[in-house]
Structures are given as C-alpha cells and as structure tokens.
Image (spheres, coloured by chain):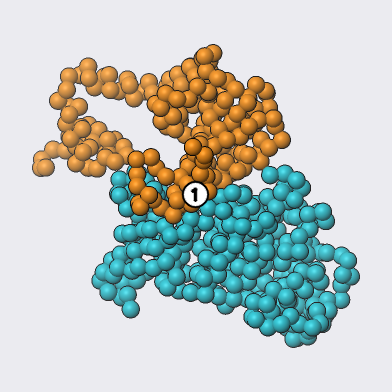
Amino acid sequence: MYDTVMALIADQAVVLAKVDYSETSQVIVFFTREHGKVRAIAKGIKRGTKKRFAVGIDLLDVGHVVVSSRRERGAALATVTEWKQTTANAGLREKLFRIYGAQYVVEITASLTEDWDPHIELFNALMATLRQLCEVSEPLTSVVRFQLALLDSIGSLPRFESCVQCSRREDLLVFSSFEGGMVCKHCEPGQVEKRHVSPATLERLWDLHSAAEGAPPQATAPHTGLDPTVDVSDAGTGSHASGRPGRASSNPKVQSEYVGPFDLLDYHISHLMGRAPRMASKLVSVQVRRRAGGG
Amino acid sequence: MSGETIQSLAHLKEQFQKLPGIGPRSAERLAFHVLREPREYAAQLARAIIDVKDKVIHCTTCYNLTERDPCPICSNHNRDQGEIWVVEQPNDVMTLESSGLIHGVYHVLMGHLAPLEGVEPENLTLDALVDRVRAGGVREVVLALNPTLDGDGTALHIQSLLGELDVTITRPARGLAVGSQIEYATAGMLESAIRGRAPM
Ligand SMILES: [Zn+2]
Ligand SMILES: [Zn+2]
C-alpha cells in the first residue's frame, strides 16, 4: 500500500521515544494508530528554527503527525513534515508515579512492537491508559490492564486458567514465561524457568483477564494448592528477571492487589524484551514511597 | 583542487568541521580566514581555546561555570542566598541572568532525569542541592527546569527529596507565550494556562 517511491502518511500518534540525531535534529519514535511504530526524523526541532516545531515534540505527547517516507515502507527513516499536539494529558505531569506509569507503558510498547506493524486496538488501549493515568491515585491498576492488552495484541498473552503442559485446572503452582503460562504442581518439577505465583495474584489475573474478554468472572477461582495466606509472588525461582530485590510486595504494608499481577506480567514482558524494562522498578518504588507517606 | 595537498590547512579544516553546525564549506572558509590573518591573530585564537579548557571550572556550590570558586554569584553578598533557582544547564543561568530580575542564587543540575535513557539521580547534582537546603538559610527553591516531561519528572523528584525540609518549593508560571495568539497555542500550552490561571 505504501510501497511507493514517496508517500505522505498522516495519522494519530503517541510519542514513545526521542533520540538526539544531530545538533538540530531528533529521531522521534511514534506509535501511530494505523501504521504502528514509525521512526521519523524531525529536522530543525532542537533549535526551534522550523516554525512547525516551535515548541518541540515531547515524550508522551499525543497528536496528529504527517511523515514522508521516501522509500518503500520501513526501508528508511521517515521525515516528520507536520506535527500538531491534540491532547496534552497534563494530569500526568502532576505526580511522579503517573509519569513513571506512562513511561513504563510506552517503554514496553516501543520494545515489543515492530516498525510499520499496525495494532489499532493497542493504540486505543494506549490512548485510554494515558488518559486514565492523568487522574489515578495509584498507577498499577491501569498499567496491569495495559500489560494484558499489549500481550494480547502481540499474541503473547500467557495462559492463566490451566496448566500449559497437562491442561489441568487445579493445583496451578508456578508461572513459566518460556512455556507461556501456568504450570501445575505435577508438571512443575520438570520446569527449569519458573516463578511462584500466589493464589491472590492468580485470582486477580483471572478477574482481569475475563473482564478484558467481556466474559463474567469465573464462578470458582483456580485452586492453587497453596496456603492462601502466604504471598510468594516475589519468590521467583527462575533467574531471568532477578536483580530487583526488595520489591513492593515484600512489604505487607504497601501490598497493593495489583503489585503481584504487575510483577508477574513484568516478568513475562522482561523475557520477551530480553531485559527488564527500565521503568519497572521505579514504578514500584515510587508507589512504595508514596504509600509510606512520602512524595 | 589538484596538485599537492597542504596537510596543515587540511588538518585545520578538519578540526573546524568537527564544530557543531559547521559543514565542509564553512570549515574551508574558516581555515582560509585564519591563514590570511596575521600570526598574532592565530596565536590569540589558539590561546583563547586553550584558556577556556584550562580556566573554566564548575563552582563547587552551585555548579555553574566559573573561573573562580565560589563563583561571583555565590560569593556576592548582595544576592539573596535564601532563594535558589534550580536549572538544568549553565546556559539557563545565563538566560535567567539576562532578565536582570533574579536576585537569588542558582543550582545547576547538569541535566535532567531521563529514566528511559538511563540518566539517574546520581548523574545529577541532586545530593549537593539537598545538602545546601539542609544546611539552612534557604527559604525558597524555584524549580526552573524545562517544562518537558523529563524536566517535570525531575521537578517532582526534587519536590519529594525536599518534601520534609522547611522550604517553599515553587516553579515559574507556564502556559501561553506572551506576545503570541491563543489561536496558535498548543494543547499543552492551553491546558497549562487554563489549569494555572491566576487572579488579576
Ligand atoms: Zn500440569
Ligand atoms: Zn556558584
């Protein structure tokens, strides 16, 4: 469709990232509604020499972009020819945890989507999440919903309701990112990469998952065979997403019902990204500080 | 050009071309300019370049660029030492000073937090700022950071660092650009202006 010599593409977009390119130019990574992730150079933006960029293009800005793509799509860096901010989402900038939540969301979107690969439903989810984050008093509820939307959109949504190996719906014990879901206690011994999941976390994920699909929540919560008073959601036995000790859930006072699901989905996302998202530990730690009465 | 390559001229051109905003043509023009001028001019130019590297340091109080420590602003007793203007870069000090309206002193962070790019609190002069405020005598900290997302994030981070100390934290007004027209304001400018409207 865009395999022309030169195409002008207009679309709605969210700014996922920007990188200095030269003394006066930046490369902006947009997530567009109908064209997916698009990298485009904004010439003259850093000096404000171009009238159309008089105020710059900022991270998390939402607007209308026109880019020209010189070669066939994806073959070369596009050029930003027009930009008009349409939504300010100013509420984000009032609280650090809102900024961190939004930055986490754009970080994983930038990392797990491909250039010129459209995901309209994901774009809509991103817009809705940024809007929600402008007003929230805690970010994880919105962020966890977005994690699920992203994983669903890229076809990597894990299976939470039954064992990925034997399909048993009871005795679900650990999560394996490699296997793409829960593993029951009978299949667990053969599993190298795994992470314990608390019953509370699993239940919460079930609720979120079925709510996302528009189905009523399951009448019976999955039986995990674990003592429900013990939250071991942080006791990762897999080594891949380690390196962030002392996360929020280790402190019962700051336990949020979304910390467990967030950590588990972030563990899975870290595997898909090949590294832990930079914003993950910040998001949880700012949450802890805030709940402990700090800023 | 043909014939012999004049090495020293080519070398000078090469050095000029490394300067920001200087392309091959401008670099060549500058190199020929130096060549045409008297030897004394070249010596002065070279000395000026070396001097700026040898003499300019960061003030150990405010981190602004200076040739003596503490800098003239920090050591000026007519400046209000109880009012600290926090900025990202030394350039911002120059811009604010040029307004002639600031009677306080400065603190240069040497950047802003950019967690997605790996710029963390320890990469900035945040500890020194907290120490200055903790040392007492500071009434007001003005967070004059760029109103970008990273600048705003840095301001919120500083607010949480100074939260328990007895100091007023403010930031410059934001919104519509003076002399502009509402019609051409961006969504961000409008929203800031509307939320931050002030009585008159
Ligand atoms: Zn099984
Ligand atoms: Zn100083």
Q: Position of residue B186 (x, y in %)?
A: 41, 52
Q: For this rendering, which residue is in front, A1 or A193?
A: A1
Is B8 on the left-hand or right-hand side of B57? left
Query: Is residue B11 positioned above or below B52 on the image?
Result: below
Q: Which chain is orange?
A: B
Q: Position of residue A283 (x, y in %)?
A: 65, 54
Query: Is residue B67 positioned above or below B87 on the image?
Result: above
Q: Chain of mark 1?
A: B
**In which image quadrant can residue A35 be found?**
bottom left
**In which image quadrant can residue A269 be found?**
bottom right
Identify the image quadrant of the N terminus of chain B.
Answer: top left
Q: Position of residue A23 (x, y in %)?
A: 35, 44
Furthest-left residue in this view: B2
Q: Which chain is cyan?
A: A
Is B200 on the left-hand or right-hand side of A290? left
The residue located at (22%, 16%) in the rendering is B40
Q: Is the distance from the Cβ of mark 1 to the nearest ligand 2 atom less than 8 Å?
A: no
Query: Is residue B31 positioned above or below A189 on the image?
Result: above
Q: How many marks?
A: 1
Query: Label 1 neighbourhood size at 10 Å, few (<14), some (14-19), many (20+)?
Result: few
Furthest-front residue in this view: B200
The residue located at (24%, 22%) in the rendering is B42
Q: Say what secondary structure mark 1 lies in.
A: helix
Furthest-bottom residue in this view: A167
Query: Could one spot residue A110 in this view of the protein?
Result: yes
The residue located at (51%, 44%) in the rendering is B197
Report the residue marked by disc 1: B194
Amino acid type, callout 1: Ile
Q: Position of residue A224 (x, y in %)?
A: 83, 76
**In which image quadrant can residue B44 be found?**
top left
Query: Could one spot residue B114 in this view of the protein?
Result: no
